[in-house]
Image (spheres, helix red, strand yellow):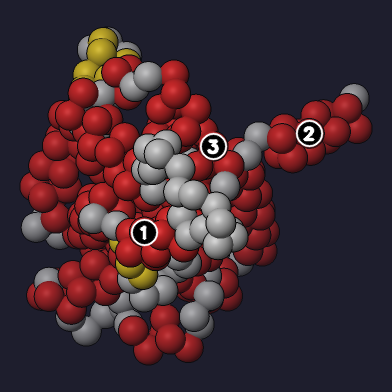
């Protein structure tokens, strides 16, 4: 029985795509951390002890920049760390749901980049907030979880297709722009209170970069890798297109066939159409083009 369950889980992870693998990793980390916590609590008179929190802090983001530079991996590892069950549950449900929407709109490559970049942007906002709020001065606090990345994906989806409708339990269909607005208002309201202020600022940072990523993409810029420099792509596509139109031989005449639209320009037009009219207004040709781009 257990062998069958293991093989089924292994198959789901192998074929489920990035979001399933990401969720599986978060669940694995959650189980390991809580087993370690249970062990230290049992052997330390009901308290996890210093060693347990040293382990947690070594993989979570700190409000002290020195710690984050000394342990540079925390910029990534903090995303996959969850201690509480409901913290994990809600983040994973939102991650699979919103991540799949963004992936459907602009492809898996951009969706994955948004996931990691908004998490890092949220971490930066968390560190800034810890330096600003008076109740954080003189103490070191830590942040972990995928909330900033999930919020970033939500705002990326809302920027891509504001009228995209999602179905909420007990409410019904809601345009995603209103869902993003409610999340932002709640984070702004609770950011000033002395309860997880840094976490709410991290959400705001993720939301900002999710919006910024799509805005830059529409302008012809893309982030080729995490924290890489902006690279202008529209001109490169245009230059390649010009080179392809040169004659292959001196005696060959130029064709009167209309010149094809460069991929980047066509992609920008489709993204603008999604923004103004919604995903459902795309033609089958435009949907096929988006699917082809996502595979590239």
- Gap between marks 2 and 3 measured at Cα: 25 Å
Q: Position of residue 55 (x, y in %)?
A: 57, 72
Secondary structure beneath label 1 = helix
Tell us which disc is closer to us: 2 or 1. 1
Q: Residue at x 15, y 34 (%)?
A: 182
Left or right placement of residue 140 versus residue 272 in this view: right
Crowd rating for badge 1 (residues with CA inside 10 Å; few <14, some 14–19, many 20+)? some
Q: Residue at x 50, y 42 (%)?
A: 293
**Which residue is nearer to you in this view: 254 or 139?**
254
Q: Position of residue 248 (x, y in %)?
A: 58, 58
For marks 1 and 3 on the same chain, the one whose residue lies earlier in the sequence = 1
Q: Position of residue 152 (x, y in %)?
A: 31, 49
**Which residue is nearer to you in this view: 157 or 130?**
157
Asked if the residue under mark 1 is in contact with the one under mark 2, i.e. CB atoms within 8 Å, the reply is: no
Q: Residue at x 49, y 80 (%)?
A: 72
Per the image, the residue denoted by label 2 is 11
- 69 above or below 265? below
Left or right placement of residue 237 versus residue 188 in this view: right
Per the image, the residue denoted by label 1 is 238
**Which residue is nearer to you in this view: 236 or 122?**
236
For marks 2 and 1 on the same chain, the one whose residue lies earlier in the sequence = 2
- The image shows a total of numbered marks equal to 3
Crowd rating for badge 3 (residues with CA inside 10 Å; few <14, some 14–19, many 20+)? few
Q: Position of residue 156 (x, y in %)?
A: 30, 44
**Which residue is nearer to you in this view: 35 or 217?**
217
- 131 above or below 182? below
- Gap between marks 1 and 3 measured at Cα: 20 Å
Per the image, the residue denoted by label 3 is 292
Q: Residue at x 57, y 47 (%)?
A: 296
Asked if the residue under mark 3 is in contact with the one under mark 1, i.e. CB atoms within 8 Å, the reply is: no
Left or right placement of residue 138 versus residue 121 in this view: left
């Amino acid at each position: 029985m257990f062998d069958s369950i293991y093989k089924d889980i292994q198959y789901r992870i192998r074929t489920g795509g990035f979001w399933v693998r990401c969720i599986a990793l978060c669940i694995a980390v959650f189980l390991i951390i809580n087993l370690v916590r249970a062990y230290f609590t049992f052997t330390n008179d009901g308290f996890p002890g210093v060693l347990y929190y040293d382990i947690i802090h070594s993989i979570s983001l700190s409000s002290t920049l020195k710690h984050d530079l000394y342990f540079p991996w925390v910029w990534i590892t903090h995303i996959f760390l969850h201690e509480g069950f409901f913290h994990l549950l809600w983040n994973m449900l939102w991650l699979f749901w919103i991540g799949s929407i963004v992936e459907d709109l602009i492809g898996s490559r951009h969706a994955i980049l948004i996931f990691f970049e908004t998490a890092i942007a949220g971490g930066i906002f968390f560190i800034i907030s810890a330096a600003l709020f008076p109740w954080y001065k003189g103490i070191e606090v830590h942040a972990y979880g995928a909330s900033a990345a999930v919020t970033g994906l939500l705002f990326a989806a809302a920027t891509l297709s504001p009228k995209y409708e999602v179905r909420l339990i007990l409410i019904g269909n809601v345009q995603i722009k209103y869902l993003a607005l409610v999340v932002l208002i709640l984070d702004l309201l609770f950011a000033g209170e002395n309860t997880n202020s840094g976490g709410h600022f991290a959400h705001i940072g993720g939301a900002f970069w999710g919006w910024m990523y799509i805005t830059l993409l529409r302008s012809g810029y893309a982030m080729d890798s995490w924290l890489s420099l902006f690279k202008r792509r529209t001109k490169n596509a245009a230059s390649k297109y010009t080179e392809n139109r040169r004659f292959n031989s001196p005696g060959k005449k130029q064709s009167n066939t209309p010149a094809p639209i460069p991929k980047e320009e066509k992609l920008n037009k489709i993204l603008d159409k999604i923004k103004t009219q919604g995903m459902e207004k795309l033609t089958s040709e435009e949907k096929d083009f988006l699917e082809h781009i996502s595979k590239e």
